[in-house]
Image (tube, grey):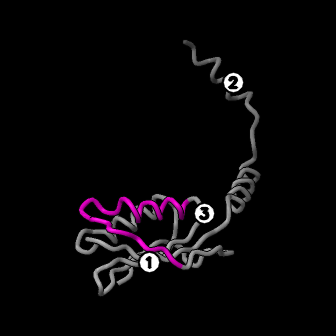
Amino acid sequence: MSLLPLAAAAVAAPRIPLRLFGRGLAATMSTSGSLKSVDYEVFGNVQGVCFRMYTEGEAKKIGVVGWVKNTRKGTVTGQVQGSEDKVNSMKSWLSKVGSPSSRIDHTNFSNEKSISKLEYSNFSIRY
């Protein structure tokens, strides 16, 4: 197969200015759905099993912001913010998956609300 037809097609393809593409991408991101915030507390064997580290990694993978920390009563608590579908994905992970060595008995979600903008710039572990 000759590469010449491919090269000709590439030259003939219409070009979209990057500045227009960038503006369109930003507009798409800003209208991708309503933003949600939810607090959570995870009960079970969730301390000493890298639960916070895995939670941070999963949150960054999904694309939500917020925080996670251990409590004195042996649970893990925190807050998640992001688009509704991403927050729901994180809620599912916090309820059913967790870290490989953890055991999740149940997860309580509270203060779920719509927000106009994110209150955090990333997801972090608090101490």
Give yes or no for contact between labels 2 and 3 (Cβ–Cβ under 8 Å): no
Q: Nearer the viewer, residue 117 or 106?
A: 106
State the SS at label 2: helix
* Residue picked out by circle 3: 84
Q: Position of residue 31 (x, y in %)?
A: 72, 60
Q: Kindly indicate the quadrant of the structure image that contains residue 7.
A: top right
State the SS at label 1: strand
Q: Give the range drawn in magenta.
A: 86-110
Q: Which mark is residue 78?
A: 1
Q: Position of residue 94 (x, y in %)?
A: 41, 65
Q: Position of residue 115 (x, y in %)?
A: 65, 75
* Residue picked out by circle 2: 9
Q: Which amino acid does label 3 sit on?
A: Glu
Q: Which amino acid does label 2 sit on?
A: Ala
Q: Position of residue 47 (x, y in %)?
A: 26, 75
- Give the label, 1 or 2, closer to the camera: 1
> What residue sits 68% from the left and 58% below the top?
32
Q: Does the magenta stretch include residue 95?
A: yes
Q: Quadrant of the N terminus?
A: top right
Query: Could you give the CA–CA distance between mark 1 and mark 2, rounded to whole angstroms?
Result: 52 Å
- Give the label, 2 or 3, closer to the camera: 3
Q: Is residue 32 magenta?
A: no
> What residue sits 27% from the left and 65% below the top?
102
Which label's residue is closer to the chain start, 3 or 1? 1
> What residue sits 32% from the left and 78% below the top?
75
Q: Which amino acid does label 1 sit on?
A: Gly
Q: Is residue 24 left or right of residue 86?
A: right
Query: Could you give the CA–CA distance between mark 2 and mark 3, rounded to whole angstroms?
Result: 41 Å
Q: In this view, does 82 lie to the left or right of 98?
A: right
Decide: few, some or many residues near mark 3? Use Cα within 10 Å; few <14, some 14-19, many ≥20.
some
